[in-house]
Every structure is written in structure tokens, then in C-alpha cells.
Image (spheres, helix red, strand yellow):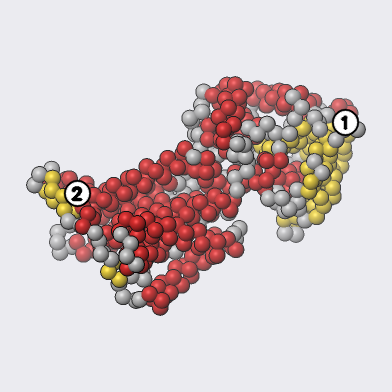
Amino acid sequence: MKKAVLEVENLVVQYGQISAVQGVNLTVNENELVTVIGANGAGKTSTLNAMMGLVPAASGEIRYKGESLLHMPVEKRPSMGIAFSPEGRRVFGPLSVRDNLRVGGNSLPASQVDGRIDEMVERFPILGERLQQAAGTLSGGEQQMLAIARALMISPDFLILDEPSLGLAPIVVAQVFELIAELHAEGVAILLVEQNVRKSLAIADRAYVMELGRFVREGAADELAADPSIENSYLGAA
Amino acid sequence: MDLFLQFLVSVLSLGGVYALLALGLSTVFGLLGFLNFAHGDLMTICGYGLYFMLAAGFGFVPAATLALALAALAAVLMERLAFRPLRGRNPMTLLITSFALSLALHVSFQIFISPKPKPIPVPEFLSGYFTIGEIFISRAQVIAIVVSVLSLVLLNLFVNRTRLGVALRAAAADFDVARAFGVKANQVIAIAFALSGLLAGLAALVWISQRGAVFPTMGLTPMVKALIAVIIGGLSNPRGALLGGFMLGLLEAGFLFTLPDSLVLYRDALVLLVLILFLMFRPNGLIATNPEPMR
């Protein structure tokens, strides 16, 4: 039996009268790559934002390594080992690449930050060439790499990735998925929210399919990938 | 050449003070998305602090240091008591709160201190003139330039080199994401206010050393100038505030040096006219990065 890193029970997220997330249950185990797939507006990002504490949960429970996250301030998460790469990358545009990484390492002891930045540069050579450049001037793919590198600064136990392939050129999308698979192989527990269903199912262990605020399917990623109904709704005829 | 040097000193000494004030305004605006109209009153608080410390027998330099600390503390308290309970509300609510706070402070100064100006004896090293060759330059102006340039350099070092400074800039760029990386919201907001109080205090010291008095609405005029500066330069980024401050200094000194004596009186009106033109043609300021501030 694998140990659960993240457990979500009956999570409900509401914006005024509108329920964006209507009672979802989700588990991510140690060393596991779990993907949540679904169309735009299905409630994927709201689910993640509730986990991060960026939007309040109306009801339900979110536990990380057994500890409830519901009333935990957002800023406590990195010191618990949770890292986040938000939808739309949201790098700190006016800050240099180096400063973005420094903020990523904000919860590390100050003496470790420079060493970690060096390790990130080794992993992402393109960032090393642009350490002094303002992050807002990077290309979309470079910004995505920076967003992930920024999240990796704390050597997280659990990584939340929100639509990392959104708006990227196909060759860059392939690089991003390759990187996620690599991180998975290194043992990081990952929750990946994606619209690129085919690619995320290909690298994930398990998957949840979200529609209109609910999970309508869940199972092993390879089984879902082979399922004709998933193929028809999400993968198209191709 | 002499005239040019005097002109330059005027531009830098006026602009420096405006830049200090404008930077304080934009530091808070960048983080919380509202203009703190009580910012000018932090100058007044610093002024009264200086007045009372001097009256208590402190020397000028220790009194000024304590007054600066008082301004920073007052700014932090302002946030704690007035703005924090309203955090996350519409910026308009915060703006109106700052108006109310400013009025309350004016009235309190009038009731509890005095409606009349209190004289502040300016020490000798701040008064009088330097002579460079044939020309006279007031010491107060030179000190104004030194203080503002030094403060700007230190501020720049703080926000670029220190962990807290970088966190502050990250929070101004994207508050939620910065928090997700462990940047503590209350801490950076308190630091932003402390910085704005410190900058207002420095501006107050320079302002007072040229005028020698403090009174309840002392902060009003410089506050309006700072507002003009941030509108010219661009509200949401420090570089714009800096540029706006010095541009305003250039405008004022320009009018002062070029207008005939009979028209110098209308200097402020002309500055406001230029402001109207800015609002018509560059409503986002000279440097319009305009990132959506996080609330």
C-alpha cells in the first residue's frame, strides 16, 4: 500500500452562486504522477487553487501528508515541500530570471539559494544564458521552463503543475512533457492538470477526468488512454 | 554656465524630494493597488516628531533619526489599523479610507498640537550658502540632492540585493504567486509601508530644512506634487515614479527660471496644465507597464 501525499475529500469550490468544483475526491500517492484532464472551464484550475489556498474551499477536506491544508496560509506550503507552477506560467515579469529563482527559493535557508540556482542552471541551460534578463522578455517556452525551475528550487516532495503545455509550440510541449516524466522518475509526486490529454495520459500513472466540476472517470492512465469513450471525447479521431 | 548650474541644482533638489515621495506612493500602490492619500501626513508626523524631539533637548541629527523611525512606525501602524481590516476589498474602498485617515490626522494635529505652524530651528550646517566661484548655492538644496540620491541608491540596493527586497518586488508583480513561494503577505506589506514612511520622512526632513516649520496640513502640498509625479511617470512601477519626480522638478524649475517675474505666481497652474495634457495623451504615464496589481 502506497502512502498518500495528497488527499482531497468532497471538495466544493464556489464563486458566489456558481459552483466551480462540486465535491471531488482525489488522491496522489508517493512517487506518483497523477493527471487531471478535462475541457476548459471544467474546474481543474479551481481545484488546484483551492489546494494552494488561493481560493477558499466551501466545504470538504484537503490533507497533505495527513495534515489539513484548509486553514493553512498560502505561504506555509513551500516549507511543507509543496511547489506550484501556475496556469499561464505567471513568472515575475519585471524581475530577472535569477530573481525569479531566488523567490522560488524564498523558503530555503538563504545560504542554500545560490547553490540551488546553480543546479537549476545546470538542468535548464537556457535559463543560465539569461539570468540577468527580465523574465517577461523570455519566450513562452522559456517562461514555462522558468516557472518549473522556480518551483523546483525547494526540491519539492509534491509538485503541482497547472497547464504547463498551454500555448507552447509543439516542440516545446514535447520538452515540457519529457521534463515532467524525468521529475516523475526522480521520485517527485506530481499532480498534473492538462488539456493535452494524449500526452499527459502517456506519462501519468493514474488519471481523473473532470467535467463540469465533477470527476466523471478515474483510473490507470493507460486504461483510460485505451478507452474508446475517452478517445472520442478528448482525443478526437486522430 | 552659472545660471545652468543653479538651474540644475534646483531641478535635482526639487525633483529629488518629489521622487522620494512618489516612490513611497508607488511602493504601496504596486502591492495593494491604491493610492494612500495619508502618505503626505507621514511627512507631517515626521515633522512633529522632529519638533518634539528638538524641544526635548535632542541634537538635530538624533532627533531627525528618531523622527524618521517615527514616520516608518506610523506608516506600519496605519496599515495595521486602517488598511489591513479592509484587505482584499475594492481599491476604491481603501482609497476613501486613506482620505478619511488623512482628514482625521489633520484635525488631530490641529486639536492636540496646534493649528499654527511650529517653528523648527534649522541647524547651521543646513542653512546658508556654498559658493562655487561666483555663484551661490543654498546648502539646503545641496543637502536635498545628497539625501535623495543617497536614499535612492540605498533603496535600489535593498530591493535588488536583499531577499526581502526581491520578495517585495515579486509580490508587487504577482502577489498570489509570490505567496505560493512562501513570501509572507503581512510581512511584505508591512515592509512596503515602513519603506513608504521612511521615504516620506526623508522628504519631510529635506522639506523642513528649506522652510523651517511644521503645521497640520504640511503634507498636503507635497502629497499633491507626488501625485502629479506618479501620474507623469506611471503609477505602477518605481522607475516611473522616479522619472516623474525628476520631470516635475524639471518642469517647476523650468517655469521658475524662464517665466517673467510677473508670471512666476502662476507656476503651479502651468504645472497642472501640463498634468492635464498628460492625462489626455499619456494617461498611464511615461512608463506604462501597467501590470494589474494584486489585491
Relative depth, front residue between A136 and B211: B211
Question: Depth check: B251 or B135 in front?
Answer: B135
Q: Position of residue A86 (x, y in %)?
A: 66, 39
Q: Quadrant of the N terminus of chain B?
A: top left
Indicate the chain on which mark 1 is placed.
Answer: A
Percent x, y of residue A26: 83, 42
Amino acid carrying label 2: it is: Phe
Left or right: B32 as drawn, with respect to A3: left
Give percent across and percent down for residue A217: 87, 39
Q: Nearer the viewer, residue A110 or A61?
A: A110
Q: Secondary structure at mark 1?
A: strand
Is A206 placed above or below B92 here? Answer: above
Front label number (1 vs 2): 2
Number of dots carrying numbers: 2
Residue at screen point 40% across, 53% down: B199
Q: Write down the residue under mark 2.
A: B7
Element type at marker 2?
helix
Circle 2 Cα neighbour tier, 10 Å, few/some/many (<14 / 14–19 / ≥20): some
Q: Which residue in the protein does label 1 denote?
A: A220
Residue B186 located left or right of residue B34: right
Task: Please state the chain letter of the residue tagged with numbered disc 2 in the rendered image.
Answer: B
Picture coordinates of residue B258, whole percent (x, y): 17, 53
Question: In which image quadrant can residue A79 be found?
Answer: top right
In the visual, does B224 lie left or right of A94? left
- The C terminus of chain B lies in quadrant: bottom right
Q: Residue at x 51, y 51 (%)?
A: B191
Which of the two residues, A181 or A43, is positioned nearer the viewer here?
A181
Q: Marks 1/2: CA distance?
A: 76 Å
- Residue at horizontal 31 percent and vertical 49 percent from the top: B147
